[in-house]
Image (tube, rainbow, N blue to C red):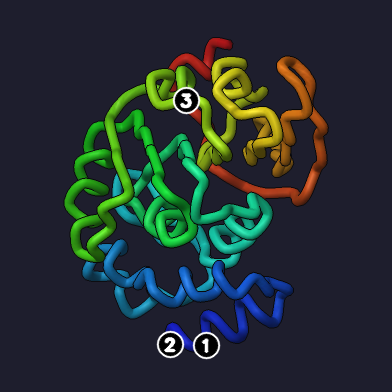
Amino acid sequence: MVTQEEMIEKQLKSRGISDEKVLKAMQEVDRRLFVPEEMKAHAYEDRPLPIGKDQTISQPYIVAYMAEKLEISPKNTILEVGTGCGYNAAVLSKLALHVYSVEIIEWLAKLAEESLPKIEVPNITTRQGDGFAGWPEKAPFDAIILTAAPASIPNPLKEQLKIGGKLLAPVGENSQKLILLEKTGKDSFKEKTLLLVNFVAMTGKAESN
């Protein structure tokens, strides 16, 4: 059975995750609290794990990699599209001032609401809804992260990003690329492709956009 310490050393540090704040967040947020009882023995393995109804919790390396690439500071306000079970939001909450997270699937939103209090994270606000529209009343955001893949990045999310902010999203229908956008002006962005990835498709309005 893989231990949390082995997860940090072998799956993160040995693969290039070097930001001490990210490593500390991954240590502080126990992935075991976010997986079903029957999967707890596998909690620290570096792979997605099923959490029910064809949904998964992301692999630790990808969670850490995405957090590191966003370069989050303690003054930052983050928008997460796709709360899932709440694990990724919990990690981000250790790095940011506040995390706003929206989940389209009702039972997952409820699961996150039940899981997150276990680790006492007062700086996360969640709600159930279509993340395509973002969270306009809390915008603009210093960083936006998507944990489900749209065919293209929704314009409302680009609009809700601060100038100088970063947006990280898996993009594509069949094969996906992890895209990092940096907002350089009101309607201008610098784009960089980071990795080939495999995320669930973004649903809701993104499907018809």
Q: Residues within 10 Å of mark 1 (few under 14, many from 20)?
A: some
Q: Is residue 188 above or below residue 46?
A: above
Mark sitting earlier along the chain (3/2): 2
Residue 2, image x, y percentages: 45, 86
Q: Secondary structure at mark 2?
A: loop
Please report the residue visible at 23 percent of the width from the left and 62 percent of the height from the top.
Answer: 120
Estimate the spatial distance between the alpha carbons at disc 3 and disc 2, rounded to whole Å. 39 Å
Q: Which residue is mark 2?
A: 3
Q: Is residue 108 left or right of residue 191?
A: left
Q: Is residue 169 left or right of residue 26?
A: right
Alpha-carbon neighbours of circle 3 within 10 Å: few (<14), some, or many (≥20)?
Answer: some
Residue 117 sits above or below residue 22 on the image: above
Which amino acid type is marked by label 3?
Ala
Q: Amino acid at mark 2?
A: Thr
Residue 66 pos. (x, y %)? 61, 54
Residue 6 got which mark?
A: 1
Residue lying furthest top in this view? 208
Instruction: Give above or below for 136 relative to 50.
Output: above
Closer to the N terminus: mark 3 or mark 1?
Answer: 1
Q: Where, quadrant-wise, is the N terminus in this rendering? A: bottom left
Q: Are marks 3 and 1 in contact (CB under 8 Å)?
A: no
Instruction: Please give the residue where the numbered disc 3 appears in the rendered image.
Output: 139
| Callout 3 secondary element | loop
Q: Nearer the viewer, mark 3 or mark 2?
A: 3
Residue 189: in sight, yes or no?
yes
Q: How much space separates mark 1 and mark 2, taking CA atoms?
A: 5 Å
- Residue type, mark 1 in image: Glu
Horizontal side of residue 86 vs 151, given as left or right: left
Residue at x 58% of width, y 11% of height:
209
Between 42 and 77, the one lying in front of the other is 77
